[in-house]
Image (spheres, helix red, strand yellow):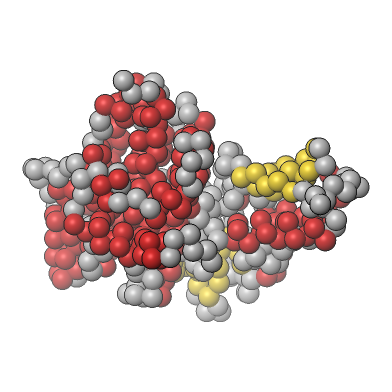
Amino acid sequence: MMTQNENLIHFLFRLGDNSLILGQRLAEWCSKGPTLEEDVALTNISLDNFGQARMIFSHLAEVENNRKTEDDYAFRRNEREFYNALIVERPIGHFGDTIARSFLFDAFQYHFYKELTKSNNEFLAALAAKSLKEVQYHVRHSGEWVVRLGDGTEESKEKIQKSINDLWEYTGDMFTTDAKIDALTNDGIAPDYNLIKENWVKTVEEVLYRATLKKPEDSYMQNGSLEGRHSEFLGHLLGDMQYLQRAYPNAEW
Amino acid sequence: MKNSSEIKLTVDEIWGILDTIPDPEVPAISIVELGVIRKVKIENNTVTVNITPTYSGCPATERFKQDIRDFLKIAGIDNVELIMQYSPAWTTNWLTDKAKEKLREYGIAPPIEGTEDKGFLFQSGPKVVACVKCNSENTEVTSQFGSTACKALYKCNDCLEPFEYFKCI
């Protein structure tokens, strides 16, 4: 029998890992952006995600009675112990791939946090109110780029359409819940994922329409992230992100 | 031996000390003027300061937490507790009018109140940010993200000056 506290811990891992892994992916653009402004924008958004992850992991540490620290959660877990949605661990690819992933996920994150502000868990409601302000700028940034690339040149349109198509099978996993999260939703702690999905579809349709792009057909959707099953890419990402703490445990700046 | 010297300052005097600490990224204004200090309390010979960060990932937060400890230590206060208070979330509305004027003088266009966009996806309606150099309203946004997450990049189409705008959140 799961207690609501264990369910909350599971939910916090899901949230924290989503932000942490996307933050790490966006940080890969540091000094490699197509323009200086984009380099700065992508790394700023990365930083917002790291900030959100830190808030969540330091709260998680409190919920777990301070047996671990936020750094333990980030640097000393293996890939099977990560619960981020599959879409955030996809490699950065070219700029269009990064923009497409960011847009599909930012739109989810926006509607997710919007619903989470109504949570009756005080921490989650505060986290959501704060993060929503930041994510609003993220989704506007990625959404405007989807329009610019889609309604751009023949080449940019072809590329961004392919990026959206390739990522589509990973979008279903963002909305997946399990018994633990459902229990939290029933108690008004976690949001209603069906509602988030409805709103997400509307946002995606609006942006793709403006971008003169086609919304892919729903077919097979990848899943498994809530049980810690991931693509090979997460392991490589962690190898990079965790190297220092693994090679020199407890190293401090 | 643990320092247990009694705190001789009042809460107001401590606010005064905090008001001399410059924001690490926009040194023209103090961290009090920025609105991140929410509460100061003296109890059991300890000074407790509640801090609300601007953006959750703002690297300046770590810096001014250290500055608070350093500045209070100089004033003879060793027992300092810093509490991160996330609710209510920081908003640009907490910037004082004096702070906004200082921002403009420093070369950063201050946030224009009431212009948080309602339509979240695409900027709704024209938002006029006057040039900090020539005051022209013929300006355009070049990027929503500037040198820090809290600022956007603008360009003046008349005097061609590039400048930063402190975004509303």
Q: Is residue A112 left or right of residue B92?
A: left
Percent across and percent down for residue B25 are: 62, 66
Name the residue rendered at 69%, 67% in the picture.
Answer: B27
Percent across and percent down for residue A75 are: 39, 55
Q: Is residue A127 above or below residue B14?
A: above
Count of labels shown? 0
Residue A132 in sight in this render: yes
Report the residue that reaches farthest toward the right: B8
Name the residue rendered at 36%, 29% in the picture.
Answer: A7
Q: Is residue A14 left or right of residue B130?
A: left
Name the residue rendered at 59%, 50% in the picture.
Answer: B53
Give the quarter of the image for residue A213: bottom left
Give the quarter of the image for residue A222: top left
Q: Nearer the viewer, residue A228 or B33?
A: A228
Name the residue rendered at 25%, 39% in the picture.
Answer: A226
Percent across and percent down for residue A33 are: 34, 73
Residue A42 in sight in this render: no
Report the residue that reaches farthest toward the front: B1
Percent across and percent down for residue A180 are: 31, 28
Q: Is residue B148 left or right of residue A148?
A: right
Q: Is residue A186 left or right of residue B78?
A: left
